Image: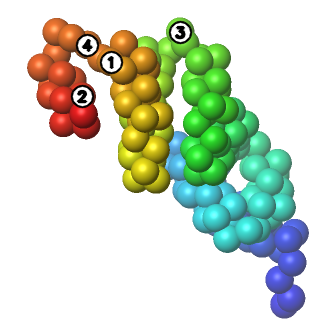
Amino acid sequence: MRLNQSNVIEFLLKLIKVNDSHEREMLRLISQYLHDHNYSAIAKELENHSNVKMEDESVYDFKQAVLSGNYTAARSLVSARSEEPWSQKVLYLLWEQSYMEHIESGKRLEAVNILQKEMMTRIDREDETSRNRIHGLA
């Protein structure tokens, strides 16, 4: 039997019962593998046939922005979800990553600006761990 996109999808859907949460997670893992190995069309077809949303588009966009080093776009996507309890922590971590990349590339002045203007304003000054983390980076 020759494998094509339809055969692969049919096989996976027979293998996995999509009404079970573990099975849905298995579909997500398979989809991630397919995307990682440039089989995005098959992953999209699997999502369409299974009716299981593999990944929200905003999550995909965020991942792509971070992986490409586009922290401005990543921060914008997180800021759009500012009502979420995790958003401020994620913004801080994005600024921290940007800071570290500036240090590594020898852009110390830009790194210091990020540390002073972005990171220092976002730490919990009552939290000793946060203060120590900032002092360690400085």
Identify the residue under disc 2: 134
For residue 62, above or below residue 27? above
Mark 4 or 2, nearer chain start = 4
Kindly check if marks 2 and 1 are in contact, taking CB atoms under 8 A apart as contact. Answer: yes
Q: Residue furthest front?
A: 109
Q: Residue furthest left?
A: 128
SS type, badge 2: helix
Identify the residue under disc 1: 120
**Disc number at residue 58?**
none
The residues bearing labels 4 and 3 have C-alpha atoms spaced at a distance of 18 Å
Q: Label 1: how many residues lie within 10 Å, few (<14), some (14-19) or many (20+)?
A: some
Residue at 52 percent across and 43 percent down: it is: 21
Report the side of 88 relative to 11 (left or right): left
- Type of residue at label 3? Glu
Q: Position of residue 90 (x, y in %)?
A: 45, 28
- Type of residue at label 4? Asp
Quarter occupied by residue 76: top right
Mark 3 or 1, nearer chain start = 3
Q: Position of residue 109 (x, y in %)?
A: 43, 35
Identify the residue under disc 3: 83
The answer to whether residue 14 is visible is no
**Disc number at residue 124?**
4
Q: Label 2: how many residues lie within 10 Å, few (<14), some (14-19) or many (20+)?
A: some
- Closest to the camera, between mark 4 and mark 3, is 4
Kindly check if marks 4 and 3 are in contact, taking CB atoms under 8 A apart as contact. Answer: no
- Type of residue at label 2? Ile
Q: Label 3: how many residues lie within 10 Å, few (<14), some (14-19) or many (20+)?
A: few
The residues bearing labels 4 and 2 have C-alpha atoms spaced at a distance of 10 Å
- Closest to the camera, between mark 2 and mark 3, is 2
Q: Label 4: how many residues lie within 10 Å, few (<14), some (14-19) or many (20+)?
A: few
Kindly check if marks 3 and 1 are in contact, taking CB atoms under 8 A apart as contact. Answer: no
